[in-house]
Image (cartoon, rainbow, N blue to C red):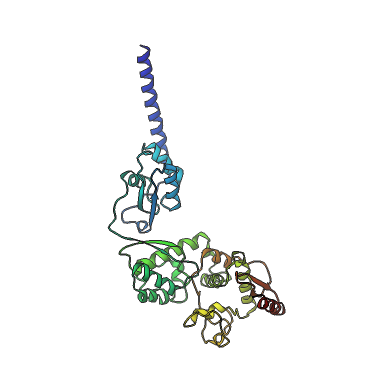
Amino acid sequence: MKRLNEDIYRKRRTTSLFLVSLFIFSLLISIIPIKIVGLNSSDLDRLVLIEAPSGSGVTEIAEKLAKGGVIPSRFKFTLFTLLGGQGANLKSGNYIMSEEMSYFDVIDRLVKGPKMSDKKLFTVVIPEGFTAKQIAARFENIMDLDRLKLENMLLDGESLDFGVPTVVNERPTGSLEGYLFPKTYLFTEGDDESSVVQEILSQFNREVSSVRLKKVMGKEYSLHEILTIASLIEKEVKVESERELVSAVIHNRLKKGMALQICATVQYVLPERKEELTLADLKFDSPYNTYLHPGFPPGPICNPGLSSIKAALNPASVDYLYYVLTDSAGNHTFTSSYEEFQAAKAKAKNGF
């Protein structure tokens, strides 16, 4: 009789725990918003490679999914997995997933295990400071895309037969230089020049939204001008702590109507890059030559990263108007007067 009572107690306890878990699970579903991605959603175009090594637990896999942007919450994923009794059923391997899939779709994929894809994956890194021409060449080398066609799209805005984000579409020139956000991208076999450009521009739109860059439009400088300043900073700075200082010099010279006199703008339009510019180079006739033309060049001279964009928006509170390269590590000496600049230049020349 005692054993029978114990068995009944255990069964009731198990049933109670199940009902409580089911109640909590149902409650969470009702109060926690879960994004369900449809089969035709554009989110499915943003692919992410997730690696789940052998022996990975729910927590480790949740961490990788969150970092990859597949799920917004590690806690919710872990909770749904455990409450669904699938904690021990997640299979190791490499998965191609989409950003912001539903939790249940992700769990289902992991339970079924990785599947062979007939599409080849391409990882393409766009470094900070790359120009549109360099980007086109990289896609030609890695994905065998048409470099000339891609250059025409990036530099002239040709064949942009897709939805270009509003902040990009309001640029004053055809060129997309400056709007091609540096990042590691994942593409699949069959992606063409248009789909590549569309994804890069979409990423730019997401990134500028994260720093509220849209708010600068209509204020002191336009979005295009901020990106232009950021591109100059990207090309001029090697030492991270100097970004805001170089930004200050650019802002201060613009306010005073001074020529920016930045060598990188001349390098941008020369037929080939030079280690050192000559006096003849500084007289090269181009609207990008900031030695000849005061104010902004027509647009960005490269594609800046987020650090340079933030520096362009937040220059240091200093009155510097000049800087000179001090050493081979990329450090600069900053000065407020031309006389100080000349002295720093002579000192730097003797130091090299």
Q: Position of residue 233 (x, y in %)?
A: 56, 70
Q: Is residue 231 left or right of residue 324?
A: left
Determine if residue 16 is in view: yes
Q: Position of residue 285 (x, y in %)?
A: 52, 87
| Residue under the image location 53 percent in, 81 percent down | 266
The correct choice, above or below, for 301 with respect to 286 in the image is: above
| Residue under the image location 31 percent in, 63 percent down | 189
The residue at the far top in this view is 1
**Closer-to-camera residue (11/3):** 3
Q: In terms of image quadrants, where is residue 104? A: top left
The correct choice, above or below, for 269 with respect to 117 in the image is: below
Q: Is residue 137 left or right of residue 288?
A: left
Q: Quadrant of the C terminus?
A: bottom right
Q: Position of residue 312 (x, y in %)?
A: 57, 68
Q: Position of residue 5 (x, y in %)?
A: 37, 15
Q: Quadrant of the N terminus?
A: top left
**Closer-to-camera residue (53/321):** 53
